[in-house]
Image (tube, helix red, strand yellow):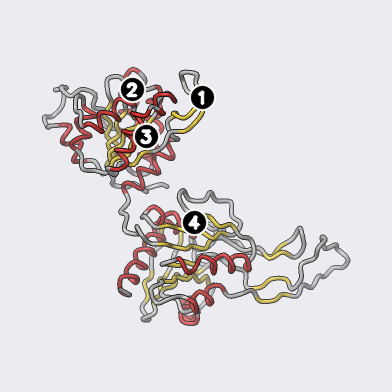
Amino acid sequence: MTGALQGKNIVLCVTGGIAAYKAADLTSRLRKMGAQVYLIMTESATHFITPLTLEVLSEHRVVTDMFDRTFTWEVEHISLAKRADVFVIAPATANIIGKAVHGIADDMVSTTLIATKAPIVIAPAMNTNMYENPTVQSNLEILKSRGVTVVEPASGRLACGDTGKGKLADPADIAHAIEIAATPQDLKGFSVLVTAGPTREAMDPVRFISNHSTGKMGYALAQRAQMRGAQVTLVSGPVSLTPPTGVTLVPVSSAQQMYDAVLTHLPQQDWVIKAAAVGDYRPATQASDKLKKHADDLSVTLVKNPDILKEIGQRKRDDQTVCGFSMETRDLIANSTAKLKSKNCDMLVANNLKIEGAGFAHDTNVATLLYRDGSSEPLDLMQKDSLADIVLDRMLTLHRKKG
């Protein structure tokens, strides 16, 4: 996600293994996410990838030698330890994992590691037999117990020719773990239900009635809530998006299926965010065979679907917080305020489909937040993940006011 690490300082340590070459990909990803990346390499790592490569990608000098004097004086391992918002070792060999457990500090990586107070992310990479060795597994469990994030290695064919677990995790997965480590966990302990995407109301086995929703807003909400520590259940209509890592996905198609799924999960939730674009009507009957063309006109009788948000509002407990969404093409505030009150929401996100950059299919949105006390908060055009964070911030405030 572009800009997700904007302003963050990542200290990335590269240790000696064939997977060290993937540090180039990881560095590039982190830079694209807005981070400043400061690299430390062990001497062994420099045999697999040159410091120059990582210097070009990071735009910072790579540190390799504890006793290098060719720079402006400072106690560099302490400086880097303090600078880090997240401290990363990828790839992490069995050697550095053992040093980390026992507090051995005999090179620049291990010395800086022992001095940092930043969140630590370690991505092991080694031969399968080494990884499965009881000592290595015990060391990893000790690190986890100390709060270190361990990004599990992948399985596959290794450089040594063996097949098994030990490949460095995909750089995208490591970057995701770093992003989580850099994100305040202010929603830890919360259960959040998010609905997303369109619904489809079948006319026959071939055709259906639907809308233009892509699910981007709901998926952004689910991802940001999970990143901030919440347990997230995502009830999603049919979309082409990849589900966010770490959320519980409940796929549905029709409005009735979404209604059933939401009410099943509702009692366990602290918050409900209904961002899905649910069809208001469905065909009264669904043909068992494809409807054939027999005339110029075709009439389809529609019946009303269950009102999911209204049902949530009627059933919600005093300790549950509910956010609805409204999409309008005219009288945005008046129509959305009426919806907020009639559906018993705590807040509502209103956006006008006629505003450029808002609504379906865009990565951006323009919204006005409405509250039960009659206040409103107009927001400028922004990325949907940024809007998601604002919505979550406001829900957290409302939740705290409830005590």
Closer to the chain start, of discs 3 and 2, is: 2
User: Which tag, 2 or 4, sits closer to the chain's start?
Assistant: 2
Position of 350 compared to 82: left or right? Answer: right
First of labels 3, 4 by sequence position: 3
Density class for disc 1 (Cα within 10 Å; few <14, some 14-19, many ≥20) is: some
Residue at image mark 3: 123
Q: Are marks 2 and 4 in contact (CB under 8 Å)?
A: no
> What residue type is disc 2 on?
Gly
Percent position (x, y) of residue 142? Answer: 30, 38
Disc 4 target residue: 219
Q: Secondary structure at mark 2?
A: loop
Estimate the x, y position of residue 360 in percent, counting from the top left.
54, 61
Residue hosting label 2: 16
Badge 2: residue crowd in 10 Å (few <14, some 14–19, many ≥20): many
The residue wearing badge 1 is: 163
Q: Amino acid at mark 3?
A: Ala
Taking depth in this image into account, of 393 and 161 the one nearest to the observer is 161
